Image: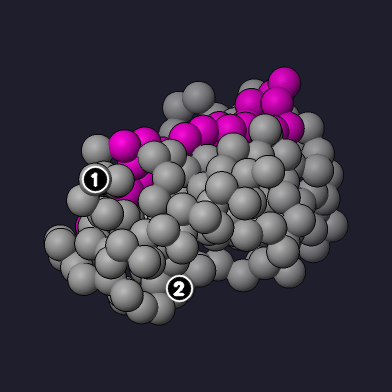
């Protein structure tokens, strides 16, 4: 299906939910990596999500101070713009996702129903994207504390690949059909 043009590399983007936001969105620009004329796409091998709390001074991985009660946090990465909403799990545009549950009574943080990382593998096992952007949406079920921010950092292990004409067209048709 695809032949590798580069070795693996990492793309990283963070979105921040602050005291007035329960939803945060962001994009990762793939425009310089995808080339329609050369039938070039991005092969995604793995997606990791790192959750951190930020108090204005330092980042830490204990997110328990970010909300005042038990809460759920989720993040999705998609290759079509979801308009700031979390998509249903069977949507073909979802590239990766993760969720985290904070039990304030224990206190404990644990993976929820959506485990992380999403690991696809190399080339024929990977998730190939030919769109020029990836979209990140993160959501909290509770308001973020007044003096805190919750940051979801999405790390993507990828490589640039060359596709056959038939495979490139298949991906383009699938992406266009999912957009309608």
Q: Position of residue 7 (x, y in %)?
A: 16, 65
* Depth check, front residue: 2 or 169: 169
User: Image point 63% across, 44% down: which residue?
Assistant: 179
Is the N terminus in the top left, top right, bottom left or bottom right quadrant? bottom left
The answer to if 10 sits in the magenta stretch is yes
The answer to if 121 sits in the magenta stretch is no
User: Image point 47% across, 43% down: which residue?
Assistant: 134
Q: Residues within 10 Å of mark 2 (few under 14, many from 20)?
A: some
**Residue 170 against residue 41 in the figure, above or below:** below
Relative to 37, 17 lies left or right: right
Q: Is residue 64 visible?
A: no
Instruction: Please tell me which of labels 2 and 1 falls first in the chain.
Output: 1
Relative to 52, 113 lies left or right: right
Q: Position of residue 35 (x, y in %)?
A: 26, 45
Report, in whole angstroms, how far the alpha carbon at label 2 lies from the one at label 1. 29 Å
Q: Residues within 10 Å of mark 1 (few under 14, many from 20)?
A: few
Q: Which residue is mark 2?
A: 119
* Depth check, front residue: 134 or 53: 134
Which stretch did the figure color magenta?
9-31
Relative to 106, 16 lies left or right: left
Is the C terminus in the top left, top right, bottom left or bottom right quadrant? top right
Q: Position of residue 10 (x, y in %)?
A: 28, 54
Mark carried by residue 37: 1
Identify the main secondary structure in magenta.
Answer: strand
Q: Quadrant of residue 21?
A: top right
User: Image point 58% across, 33% down: which residue?
Assistant: 25
Kindly state the secondary structure of the residue where label 2 is placed. Answer: strand
Relative to 56, 24 lies left or right: right
**Residue 4 against residue 51 in the figure, above or below:** below
């Amino acid at each position: 299906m695809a032949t590798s043009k580069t070795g693996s590399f990492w793309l990283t983007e963070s979105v921040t939910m602050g005291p007035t936001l329960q939803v945060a969105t962001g994009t990762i620009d793939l425009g310089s990596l995808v080339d329609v004329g050369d039938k070039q796409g991005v092969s995604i091998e793995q997606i990791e999500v790192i959750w951190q709390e930020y108090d204005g001074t330092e980042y830490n991985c204990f997110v328990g101070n970010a909300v005042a009660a038990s809460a759920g946090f989720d993040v999705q990465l998609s290759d079509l713009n979801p308009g700031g909403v979390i998509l249903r799990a069977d949507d073909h545009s979802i590239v990766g996702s993760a969720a985290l549950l904070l039990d304030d009574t224990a206190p404990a943080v644990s993976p929820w129903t959506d485990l992380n990382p999403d690991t696809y593998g190399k080339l024929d096992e990977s998730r190939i994207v030919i769109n020029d952007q990836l979209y990140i949406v993160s959501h909290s079920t509770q308001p973020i504390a007044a003096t805190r921010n919750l940051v979801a950092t999405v790390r993507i292990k990828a490589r640039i690949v060359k596709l056959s004409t038939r495979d490139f067209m298949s991906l383009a048709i699938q992406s266009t059909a999912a957009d309608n």
